[in-house]
């Protein structure tokens, strides 16, 4: 399984209840596609430029773990959601789990 981050920008005119509902729907959709949510957060930000005549929106970031087919299936399912202004899914780099052994004795060198 790979780790991904979903970044979604939703309409800034939605109330807090709608934002929570959309976030829960995204998390449930991830679970339906075989993923597991690792972390999720929501932030309200101003845009650098207008998007659909709006100057600010709510960002939803969800870190998740899933099979490689999940991101494309998610993108297809979310493509026509009207409240989503932008959507991006990034594959996160794998963390190395093996570290070099630091307790090895130094190799002896001979001086002649």
Image (tube, grey):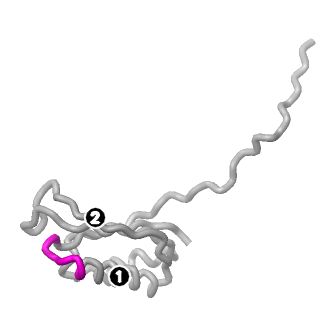
| Apparent side of residue 97 relative to residue 23 in the rendered image (left or right) | right
In the depicted structure, whether residue 110 falls above or below residue 92: above
Label 2 crowd bin: few (<14), some (14–19), many (20+), radius 10 Å? few
SS type, badge 1: helix
Location of the C terminus (image quadrant): top right
In the depicted structure, whether residue 20 falls above or below residue 101: below
Q: Are marks 2 and 1 in contact (CB under 8 Å)?
A: no
Label 1 crowd bin: few (<14), some (14–19), many (20+), radius 10 Å? few
Residue carrying label 2: 43
Sequence order check, earlier mark of 2 and 1: 1
Query: On the image, which quarter does residue 8 sit in?
Result: bottom left
Q: Which mark is residue 24?
A: 1
> Residue pushed farthest bottom?
32
> Residue pushed farthest right?
112
C-alpha span from label 2 to label 1:
15 Å
SS type, badge 2: strand
Residue 6 lies, in percent from the top left, at 37, 69
The residue sitting at 32% across, 78% down in the picture is 23
> Residue pushed farthest front?
16
In the depicted structure, whether residue 41 falls above or below residue 106: below
The residue sitting at 50% across, 83% down in the picture is 34
Query: On the image, which quarter does residue 111 sit in?
Result: top right
Q: Which residues are magenta?
A: 12-18
The residue sitting at 16% across, 54% down in the picture is 48
> Residue pushed farthest top?
112
Q: Nearer the viewer, residue 88 or 28?
A: 28
Q: How many marks?
A: 2
Q: Which mark is residue 5?
A: none
The residue sitting at 39% across, 80% down in the picture is 27
Residue 74 lies, in percent from the top left, at 37, 79
In the depicted structure, whether residue 59 falls above or below residue 79: above
């Amino acid at each position: 399984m790979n780790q991904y981050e979903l970044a979604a920008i939703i309409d800034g005119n939605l109330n807090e209840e709608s934002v929570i509902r959309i976030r829960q729907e995204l998390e449930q959709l991830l679970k339906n596609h075989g993923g597991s949510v690792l972390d999720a957060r929501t932030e309200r930000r101003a845009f650098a430029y207008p998007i659909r005549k709006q100057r600010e929106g709510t960002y939803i970031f969800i870190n998740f773990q899933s099979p490689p087919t999940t991101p494309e299936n998610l993108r297809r399912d979310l493509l026509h959601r009207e409240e989503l202004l932008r959507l991006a899914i990034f594959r996160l780099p794998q963390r190395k789990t093996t570290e070099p052994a630091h307790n090895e004795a130094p190799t002896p060198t001979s001086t002649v």
